[in-house]
Image: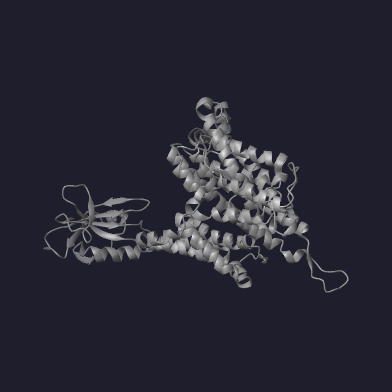
């Protein structure tokens, strides 16, 4: 380079380095500390933990949550199509990890019915009973024998690999700051989807509740196949649905609420059911004498870490995305609810990272995917839980069972676990009451609820979720295509401007039209905007002595016409000028006159 050119390049680089937001900086200790505190939120609150004020409340809340988490872990493992002990593993490792990485003080992470059912449908699809049916070697008329041990081992492998993928997806999305994706799962969509999931849960658990041997199906129309092959289940399904929708629900919850001020801790209904049913089963030898299905062997101790069977990855990618998004949306919605109630904030991106690490790391210890549970979170919050210490103590109770007294629950009948699952579906079935409310408030949101419900029941939870999201996006396009428009008038004595067609007291200003359009303007709805404007504002454009229909779309168009632009009202004398006030309520609100 010649000297002048070199000097010019140097000056340009120095100017870019000083002014560019992308300039490189050495990592200071302050930035490193901020990054560590952001990645490990426990470092922000544990050093200043007020032991005297919080510890007792966290201990009581942790014990109360633990006695609920134990039977739910055993029960939801049945939904995931794996042996019950893996539900205990999934109730320990992820909760322990969330204490370090999570930002919510009140949610209880662990097994959850909807996620467990989604995992179970994938496990049954990838490892059906037909793969493990052993035919008699001598060709006799003896019926085929199902190798339950090999089938369960394969389903555990599928669930573990799926959990690993879910963790990776959630962790990467958190690093990429994709916490906003939960906004696409609107409340009607989530409630319709979870209601459909509760239908699948009931259908899958009726065979355990009634002791009926039925084949488990997965994929589209699986609910129809089960009902067709086992019509005896249908009347009992509608009976359960009716009781959940119109019944009084959990009597223990009623007693806890009724005597809330007098009880030091809530009555643990689930653990009472587990203890009583286990005692009866053991005392009457139900498994040996009456062939009642029980939990069976619960190994003592924790399993050593093992690598997942990565050869299963290609067939599980689509399912892992569905489980990852649903799990995060459930967790962040409940976390924000409690954060708003108790005046603190949660970080959606850090929650994604926390759930991702919980699932990914725990999968090496034979767990299946987790999220937060509404019922356990309500127990943890209502019993006075203050921080994540409560969840940690609950997980330690599960650890005690796994390493010391797990054998006590081996005679537990599977019927009791099915009953626990169905009772916990009470809140989901009550979401059918959303329908009349949505009918009165918003037909579009009602359509989203119904599509999410019907699609998830008929197509399965994975394809149903995709169909519901696609339909929700279409409704967004529809809303921009058909927004509301109105002429606004001033309500005397107030600062309000209302639709003159709906409010008799609203009066227009003399010579001024206030046009309100409830959407931003873009290429897809510009013609609809012009038509609505022509319909609401009857006027002509006078420009350069020529008359034309009003063609104003944006401020730029208005300004391009310059000072010669004038609006004349066809309803008034042609010599009287009229001004137009344009209101567009969208991402960019404009005020044009």
| Nearer to us in this view, 261 or 171 | 261
Q: Residue furthest front?
A: 284
Residue 418: x percent and y percent?
A: 61, 56
Colouring of the image: one colour
Query: In this orientation, which residue lies closer to the viewer: 379 or 191?
Result: 379
Picture mark count: 0
Between 334 and 412, the one lying in front of the other is: 412
Residue 332 screen position, x and y as percent = 51, 46
| Residue at image coords 55%, 68% | 235
Query: Can residue 368 be seen from the camera position used here?
Result: no
User: Residue 442 lies in what quarter of the image?
Assistant: bottom left
Q: Quadrant of the N terminus?
A: top right
Q: In the figure, is residue 278 to the left or right of 136?
A: left
Q: Residue furthest right?
A: 138
Residue 424 appears at what percent x and percent y?
Answer: 54, 52
Is residue 440 visible to us here? yes
Image spot of residue 132 (x, y percent): 77, 63
Vertical placement of residue 454 versus 279, above or below: below
Instruction: Say which residue appears at 57% left-offset and 26% top-offset.
Output: 29
Is residue 284 shown left or right of residue 254? right
Q: Nearer the viewer, residue 224 or 587?
A: 224
Q: For residue 317, which quarter of the picture?
A: bottom right
- Up the image or down, 337 lies above or below 511; here it is above
């Amino acid at each position: 380079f010649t000297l002048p050119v070199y000097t010019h390049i140097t000056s340009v680089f120095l100017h870019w380095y000083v002014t560019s937001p992308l300039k490189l900086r050495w990592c200071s200790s302050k930035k490193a500390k901020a990054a560590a505190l952001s990645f490990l939120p426990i470092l922000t609150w544990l050093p200043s933990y007020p032991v005297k004020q919080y510890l007792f409340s966290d201990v009581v809340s942790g014990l109360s949550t633990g006695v609920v988490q134990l039977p739910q872990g055993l029960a939801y493992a049945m939904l995931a199509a794996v042996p019950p002990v893996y539900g205990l593993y999934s109730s320990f490792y992820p909760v322990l990890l969330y204490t370090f990485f999570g930002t919510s003080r009140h949610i209880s992470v662990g097994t959850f019915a909807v996620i467990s059912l989604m995992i179970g449908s994938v496990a049954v699809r990838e490892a059906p009973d037909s793969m493990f049916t052993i035919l008699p070697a001598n060709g006799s008329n003896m019926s085929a024998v199902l190798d339950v041990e090999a089938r369960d081992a394969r389903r555990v492998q599928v669930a573990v690999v799926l959990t690993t993928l879910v963790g990776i997806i959630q962790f990467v999305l958190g690093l990429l700051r994709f916490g906003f994706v939960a906004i696409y799962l609107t409340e009607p969509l989530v409630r319709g989807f979870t209601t459909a999931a509760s239908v699948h849960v009931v259908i899958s658990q009726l065979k355990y509740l009634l002791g009926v041997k039925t084949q488990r199906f997965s994929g589209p129309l699986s609910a129809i196949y089960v009902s067709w092959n086992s019509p005896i289940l249908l009347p009992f399904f509608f009976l359960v649905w009716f009781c959940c929708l119109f019944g009084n629900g959990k009597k223990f919850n009623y007693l806890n609420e009724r005597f809330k001020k007098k009880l030091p801790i809530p009555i643990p209904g689930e653990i009472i059911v587990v203890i009583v049913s286990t005692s009866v089963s053991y005392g009457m030898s139900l498994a040996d004498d009456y062939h009642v299905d029980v939990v069976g062997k619960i190994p003592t101790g924790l399993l050593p870490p093992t690598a997942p069977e990565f050869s299963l990855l290609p067939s599980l990618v689509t399912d892992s995305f569905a489980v990852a998004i649903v799990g995060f949306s459930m967790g962040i919605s409940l976390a924000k609810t409690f954060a708003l109630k108790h005046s603190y904030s949660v970080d959606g991106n850090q929650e994604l990272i926390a759930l991702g690490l919980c699932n990914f790391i725990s999968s090496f210890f034979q767990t299946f995917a987790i999220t937060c549970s509404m019922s356990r979170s309500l127990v943890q919050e209502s019993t006075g839980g203050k921080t994540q210490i409560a969840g940690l103590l609950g997980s330690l109770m599960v650890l005690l069972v796994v390493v010391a007294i797990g054998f006590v629950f081996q005679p537990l009948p599977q019927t009791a676990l099915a009953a626990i699952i169905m009772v916990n579906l009470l809140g989901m079935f009550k979401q059918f009451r959303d329908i009349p409310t949505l009918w009165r408030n918003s037909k579009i949101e009602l359509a989203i609820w119904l599509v999410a419900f019907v699609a998830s029941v008929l197509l399965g939870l994975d394809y149903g979720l995709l169909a519901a999201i696609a339909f929700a996006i279409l409704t967004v396009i529809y809303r921009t295509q058909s927004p509301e428009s109105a002429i606004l008038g001033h309500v005397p004595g107030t600062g309000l401007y209302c639709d003159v067609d709906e409010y008799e007291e609203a009066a227009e200003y003399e010579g001024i039209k206030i046009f309100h359009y409830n959407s931003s303007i873009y290429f897809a709805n510009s013609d609809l905007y012009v038509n609505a404007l022509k319909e609401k504002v009857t006027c002509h454009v006078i420009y350069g002595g020529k008359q034309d229909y009003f063609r104003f779309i944006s401020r730029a168009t208005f300004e391009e016409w310059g000072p010669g632009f004038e609006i004349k009202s066809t309803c008034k004398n042609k010599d009287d000028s009229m001004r137009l006030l344009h209101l567009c309520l969208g991402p960019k609100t404009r005020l044009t006159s």
